[in-house]
Image (spheres, grey):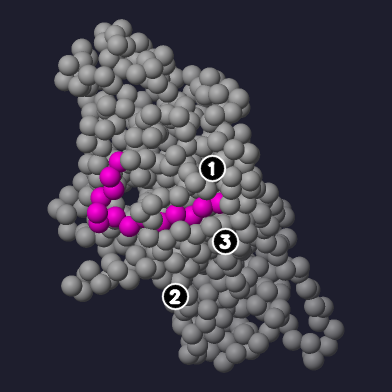
Amino acid sequence: AVHSSGCLVNRVTWPSPSYAAPQWIEKTSSDIPFDPAEAAYAAGLAFEDKGFPCCVDQYFEVVILTAPGHSEVNANPRQIDLHRSALTKLTTCGTRFSRLDPGCGLLVYCNGQPHRIPITHHGFVWEPTDFLRVVPVPNYSSSLRNLHRRSGVGIPLLVTRPRRPDAELVSKNLVFPATMIFRCIDSVDSSSSSKEVDEYDGCSIEIHDPLRVDAVQIGREVLPIAKDLSSPFAYRLLDYRGNIVTEFLTPAANEGESRLSTVEPYQKGKIPIVLIHGLLSDPFTWIEMMNDLYATEGFIENFQIWLFEYPTGQPFFTSAAALREQLENARCTFDPDGRDPKLSEIVLVGHSMGGLIAKLQVTFSGDMLWQSVARIPLEQLTVSPAMKERLVSAFFFDPSAHVSRVVFVGTPHRGSAIANRPIGRIASSLVTQPEDRRASHRELIENNPWAFTSEVTERIPSSVDILNPDSKLLQTIDKLPIAANVHLHSVIGNSRWTFGYGASDGIVPVASARHAQACTQLFVSEKHAKLHKNDETIQEVIAILREHSQSSHGKSRN
């Protein structure tokens, strides 16, 4: 079941950074020049090996002596290698000996005198206070399909953000990419590749956002910066230990466990794309798609990624109610005056059951949903105010005013074949709802005998129960009218043949994944668990987003 769910199985190797080996050239004649950069580098390595903080000062001297901007340096591969190695050592040792604060500066000593080398930040949507720790990116390997990285000026870094209250909805435990560049104004016009390091005026460290900065001017040249856009995703997967099975079997005690979060701080004027995972999964399942989206030209300029996480064992219409509420809360938090029209153009992308949650954001419930589970009107129930509020939220709603496009990826609109099978029934029977929710359910049924259908009378239906093609609730959801202004798209897996159901992705039959109102429909020969990670799927989502962006710009001009 876990294998079929789409949860992420990755292999990541994250070694220590590599460095240039020292080259000590012994001076045997006047024809062999003394190389102060090589000498400082060797001294730095020796001091570091002994645990002396002064290694930071030696590495900083190497960085200055090999700084880009000299034609001699730029043409010398050894000098380039030394510069990158010293800059990497400066980062690791500066952190180790508490000399480096990536939010503001680096402390170095020259002739016994302290100097604070300023650090400036360029292109980021993050604040300097978001830079808790920086880690040089090594030559790692990952099972990510694409690694978006290149060489250039500076060194790629990962930035760890401090944990903070989630008032602004930013995802927890975030890391983001950066590129560190050293700049020394004095070296630009110098005719020599060396300089006396007795004062550091004009020296600075720049940290650039590689998502938004592509090149920098060094002297008279504009040079591309080094960047590794995939490193944050590989790094997060390094220690990933999802508890998706546990979370499925024991869903959250209340809807507050569902969480809408942003991958970066909210950016006015950019369209949110909300990624919604499926059954037995979590937001990590979107890493392949996010990795490629961030590397796509024009994506950063027009879109921002949000994630919706929820306990997959609870009924998906309960999760849908939570998303509906949190989308509204996000609008109130980010744009209380309603001045950002892009927050009314949200795109939802839902994989598997996530697509059903997305569909319930753009449909009119009327009283159809309620009538599919109840025999009497809600007003006639004997129920507490709190329970009534929950029932109203889950069963009575209009389309969200903020969503204008939905992409269904392997979505079981008419159920999944597996829910009807013994494995599906066993999985459903193992789901244990929290005691407070079970108590509320018992009270509701006991106080209102014969008011509900058997689908909800015996126990709280799990998500697997509702994915049964025979579920009246699911059949009703399939018939709910879609808001007229919403565009729908379908990506459908057809890699398997399922007995009794025909073509499928192994979990969701093609007939169930179709939606009659879809503007586009793409068939992909892929199994269900990998359908949203498939390159064809990702390219289709990119094409849909381009279309969405173009139509959005058209609206803005009008």
Q: Earlier in the sequence, mark 1 or mark 2?
A: 2
At label 2, which amino acid type do we have?
Asp
Task: State the image coordinates of residue 546 (x, y, percent, origin top left).
Answer: 39, 68
Give the side of residue 26 with respect to residue 415, left or right: right
For the residues marked 1 and 2, what is the alpha-carbon distance in whole angstroms?
Answer: 65 Å
Was residue 74 drawn as part of the magenta stretch in this picture?
A: no
Which residue in the structure is indicated by mark 3?
535
At label 3, which amino acid type do we have?
Asp
Q: Earlier in the sequence, mark 3 or mark 1?
A: 1
Comparing marks 3 and 1, which lies closer to the viewer?
1
At label 1, which amino acid type do we have?
Val
Q: Which residues are magenta?
A: 480-493
Which residue in the structure is indicated by mark 1?
508
The answer to whether the residue labelled 1 contacts the one labelled 2, judged by CB atoms less than 8 Å apart, is: no
Regarding mark 3 in the picture, which secondary structure is present there? helix
Give the side of residue 367 with respect to residue 61, left or right: left
For the residues marked 3 and 2, what is the alpha-carbon distance in whole angstroms?
Answer: 50 Å
Give the side of residue 535 with respect to residue 385, left or right: right
Task: State the image coordinates of residue 182 (x, y, percent, origin top left).
Answer: 52, 72
Regarding mark 1 in the picture, which secondary structure is present there? loop
Residue at image location 56% in from the left, 51% down from the top: 493
Is residue 332 shown above or below 31? above
Mark yes or no: residue 198 visible: no
Of the 4 image quadrants, the one containing the N terminus is top right
Which residue in the structure is indicated by mark 2?
201
